[in-house]
Image: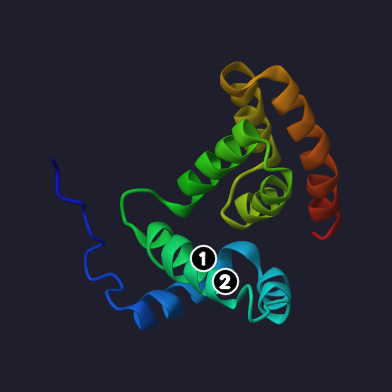
Amino acid sequence: MTTPVEPENGPTTDEERRAAGMRTRREVLGDAHVDRAVAGSTPFTAGFQDFITRTAWGDVWQRPGLARRDRSLLTLAITVALGHWDEFALHVRAAKNNGLTDEEIGEVLQHAAIYAGVPAANHAFKVAAPILEELRGRK
């Protein structure tokens, strides 16, 4: 059994992970999305929002082994493979924030067609196209 590699000088307490996670979450997903998620939090969902912020964004996305850009590539492929279309759409925007080009996103979808299936990749192109068009219009 191997010992997990911890980020060097990374967040170690729940509060540090929460703060780092919120910063990263905002940088990757954008303030508008995070503000909506926080505003939509209820007593029922508050614990889950905190969990996502601390664990996904404050721990995994902080690890030094992969750049944010690489994590975006993986997240796009995984959400396509699992058919999680709302998360996929969110992470198309995040991928652009993390420096991926439209062409690179297209390559991820081509690659996913082979490993996750043509129907999944076909649907992913349909979901991604209007998002990328909208983001191009903002420049």
- What is the x, y in percent for residue 60? 39, 57
Q: Look at mark 2 in the image and give the residue it sits on.
A: 49
Quarter of the rendering occupied by the N terminus: top left
Residue 38, by quadrant, is bottom right
Give the residue drawn at x 61%, y 35%. 82
Q: Is residue 92 left or right of residue 5?
A: right
Identify the residue shown where x is 34% and y is 57%.
63
Height in image: 48 above or below 18?
Answer: above
**Amino acid carrying mark 2 in the image:** Gln
Q: State the image coordinates of residue 137 (x, y, percent, origin top left).
A: 86, 55
| Separation (CA) of disc 1 from disc 2 | 5 Å
The numbered dot on residue 52 is 1
Q: Quadrant of the C terminus?
A: bottom right
Dot 2 crowding, Cα within 10 Å, few <14, some 14–19, many 20+: some
Q: Point out residue 85 in the picture as x, y percentages from the top left corner.
A: 73, 43
Which residue type does callout 1 highlight? Ile
User: Can you give x and y, in whole percent of width and height, for residue 129 in the image?
Assistant: 82, 39
Q: In this view of the protein, which residue sits in the foreground, 99 or 44?
A: 44
Secondary structure at badge 1 equals helix
From this view, report whether residue 65 is shown above or below residue 107.
below
Disc 1 + disc 2, Cβ < 8 Å: yes
Task: Kindly identify the residue that appears in the image at 23 percent across and 71 percent down.
Answer: 9
Q: Quadrant of residue 130?
A: top right
SS at mark 2?
A: helix
